[in-house]
Image: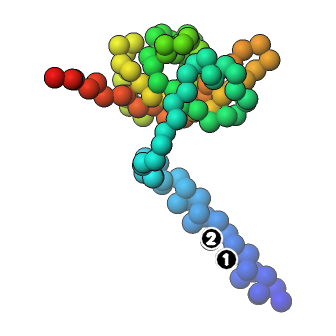
Amino acid sequence: MKKISLIALSGVLMIGGAYAGFQQGNNTQRGGFVGGPETIVTVSQVKEMRDDTPVIIQGNILQRMGNEKYLFQDSTGSITVEIDDDDWRGLTVTPNDTVKLMGEVDAGLFNTEIDIESIQIVPVVNAQ
């Protein structure tokens, strides 16, 4: 009986270790489905949304406001967004760049922010 328990315990430990190694080695960007309708909301709409609502906004990051906090603006207003350092993924953005930010609403008691998970620069389209 002790042998069976020992074998079972060894198997569980090996599987857990393999899973942890797989997770740690998976630091590359992963792809996913692209396509379908994408609903971009405005800052004024975000301010009326419930906490944890997923959102996509488009506009400009105007300035850094502190540790991982930035001022974002679109045609309807401005809002604070929180972008973790690792979410930039090497991207450099200026106030002149139009960006698309994906994240979720962080509605607090006195103010609303957006916790950003993904950033994309929107390419400039030249109409000629």
Q: Which residue is mark 1?
A: 11
Q: Amino acid at mark 2?
A: Ile
Q: Which residue is mark 2?
A: 15
Q: Does residue 30 show up?
A: no
Q: Residues within 10 Å of mark 2 (few under 14, many from 20)?
A: few
Q: Does residue 103 show up?
A: yes
Q: Quadrant of the C terminus?
A: top left
Q: Quadrant of the N terminus?
A: bottom right
Choose between 87 and 1: the one closer to the eye: 87
User: Horizontal and vertical percent for residue 41?
Assistant: 55, 27
User: Horizontal and vertical percent for residue 21?
Assistant: 54, 59
Alpha-carbon span between mark 2 and mark 1: 6 Å
Q: Secondary structure at mark 1?
A: helix
Q: Residue at x 64, y 65 (%)?
A: 16
Q: Residues within 10 Å of mark 1 (few under 14, many from 20)?
A: few
Q: Is residue 113 above or below residue 56?
A: above
Choose between 34 and 117: the one closer to the eye: 34
